Amino acid sequence: MLRRAATILAIVCAAALMSGCSMIEGLARDATGRDSAAPAEACLPRGAEPDPSPTPAPTLDPHVAGEVREAVAAVRKLAGVDTVSERTSNSRTASDDRNRPDCRIVSNHFSSQVDVVMEAEATPAQAAAVPTTMAQHLAWTGVSLSLTVPAGPGHIETTVHYSRTFDQAIPIETSTDVSEGLARLAATPHVTSLEASIPYTMRVEYGSLTVLVDGADPATLDAVRAVIDTTVFADTTLHGSFSNGAKP
């Protein structure tokens, strides 16, 4: 009997100690306004904004960072590529927590920008290999690509931006159509500047094409427009010397 009573007393004491610990943790949360185990800025007071440059700085998910490194390394090995650079940035926002009225949750928004400059004599096929190769190594919409072919004999410089398109496969046929269209326009008389943007949907017709022409006479504009109509950009929103209105 004495042994059983001692056992019951020990259980009751242990339960009391556990309850006491929970109460202490609850007081700590109430005093700080956040869970003491959470990161320092996991919960901000209402109306507060996150520190844009916290120490230590938040870092990109290691798996995603590895994919970005692999994509950049693969592009550097491609024929016709001159330079490749990559930079990752982070913007921080805070939003109200529906479950904790006095708390704002801090979120990190990472993005990576890859800039590739081809050799001036690079072929459209070589330029097309860049976005398609990147897409083979990535599964993240946070990556954007700017791909430039410098001016060379018989053609002006061209730049195409692939905006957050790298969570999907990019068929070589599509990227080749884009590169060939730009190359054809870059060699067209009177065209002085050329830049295209491909949206995250990879629907080229919902992107944009900015073309500057050195003459505004109807004959020159009609001649350049006739070349545009032979490319993948025939139905794309035009800017610069042309304007066909925004797509719905």
Image (tube, helix red, strand yellow):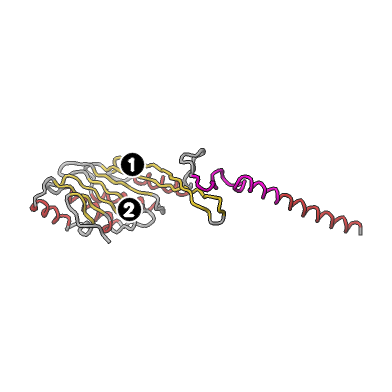
Q: Which residue lies furthest to the top in this view?
A: 55
Between 115 and 20, the residue placed more toward the observer is 20
Q: Would you name the residue on which mark 1 appears?
A: 84
Q: Would you name the residue on which mark 2 appears?
A: 132
Residue at 20% over, 57% down: 244
Q: Which residue lies furthest to the right in this view?
A: 1
Q: Tell me where residue 145 appears, x and y as whole percent.
A: 33, 48
Residue at 35% over, 41% down: 85
Q: Tell me where residue 133 appears, x and y as whole percent.
A: 34, 51
Q: Which is nearer the N-term, disc 2 or disc 1?
A: 1
Residue type highlighted by circle 2: Thr
User: On the rendered image, what quadrant is the N terminus found in?
Assistant: bottom right
36 vs 121, left or right, is right
In reply to whether residue 36 is colored magenta, the answer given is yes
- Which range of residues does the magenta coloring cover? 22-48
Reply above or below: 76 against 245.
above
Residue type highlighted by circle 1: Val
111 vs 44, left or right, is left
